[in-house]
Amino acid sequence: MATAIKEHGSAIIERLADADLCDRVDAELQPWIEQTPLGRDDFAGRSTRRTGALLARSTSAVELIAHPTVLDVVDDVFGSEKSAFQLHLTQAISIGPGSPAQQLHRDHWCFDFHPFPVGLDVEVATMWALTDFTTENGATRIVPDSHRTEGMPYTDVDTEAAVMPRGSVVLYVGSSVHGGGGNASDEVRVGINVDYSLGWLRQEENQYLSVPREIAAALPERAQRLMGYAMGGYALGYIDDARDPMCVLRPDQPSEPSFGVR
């Protein structure tokens, strides 16, 4: 998987999550999705709902967010020579009927359009299919091999749709050109978007405010480290007297700093 992503910018694992897990995540998130306002502009999608804070709103979502297979692939894509990585954002993206295709973009543009060198991958995105993804209902569209190019010399005709059955996940690096598909069906297309970034970058979603401390304290340790309760580098993320941030959630944790997910 990591080799395919490095070479072509994206890859799909079909049916990695079983039907029971999909049902649980869907049931837990549905009340939150219903309360989420529609997008405020064309890019966010005026018929699309983007529901965040998934670790706080769905106990089952952690099984997707900290899925060991996905984390192993992400670690391999980043490479062992890079710093620890962290959870960048979590969203349930619900594209409603009649929604046009999203503008093509690169996710790493969120870092204030910093000109990262071509070949440096600082973000890995995942999109889990909570409903079947089809060309008709808005499957994510990706431009193969675009991660080794610059600018935006692409149009919709250059994209390929990530068509996949429910429970599957598509992974792509932050430099891959992509966008949500247009929904020409009469159903809502729901995808669980979970992104990871290198530990020395600011997270797009503020996990400390999105997930109350009492909920964070009950999560598995690997999920806590993903959130940012770990060092992101030798001198990144410590608390007060250079203590390990995990001490906040686990008082019995050794105070000597330890690094995040590798």
Image: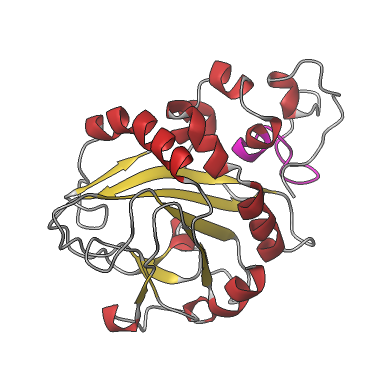
Q: Is residue 82 left or right of residue 182?
A: right
Towards the viewer: 25 or 101: 25
Q: Position of residue 61 (x, y in %)?
A: 49, 36
Towards the viewer: 233 or 186: 186
Q: How is the image coloured?
A: secondary structure
Q: Is 245 one of the magenta-colored residues?
A: no
**Residue, x 80% and y 26% (percent of image)?**
243
Q: Is residue 143 left or right of residue 118?
A: left
What is the number of callouts on the image?
A: 0
Residue 62 can be seen in this image: yes
Residue 203 can be seen in this image: no
Asked if 120 appears above or below 111 in the picture, the reply is below
Q: Is residue 173 left or right of residue 143?
A: right
Q: Quadrant of residue 36?
A: top left
**Residue, x 36% and y 84% (percent of image)?**
153
Q: Position of residue 137 (x, y in %)?
A: 23, 61
Q: Is residue 262 left or right of residue 165?
A: right
Towards the viewer: 202 or 227: 227
Asked if 156 appears above or below 60 in the picture, the reply is below
Q: Quadrant of the N terminus?
A: bottom right
**Magenta span of residues:** 225-237
**Residue, x 31% and y 30% (percent of image)?**
32
Q: Is 232 one of the magenta-colored residues?
A: yes
**Residue, x 13% and y 54% (percent of image)?**
186
Main SS of the magenta part reads: loop
Q: Position of residue 50 (x, y in %)?
A: 31, 43
Q: Position of residue 39 (x, y in %)?
A: 22, 46
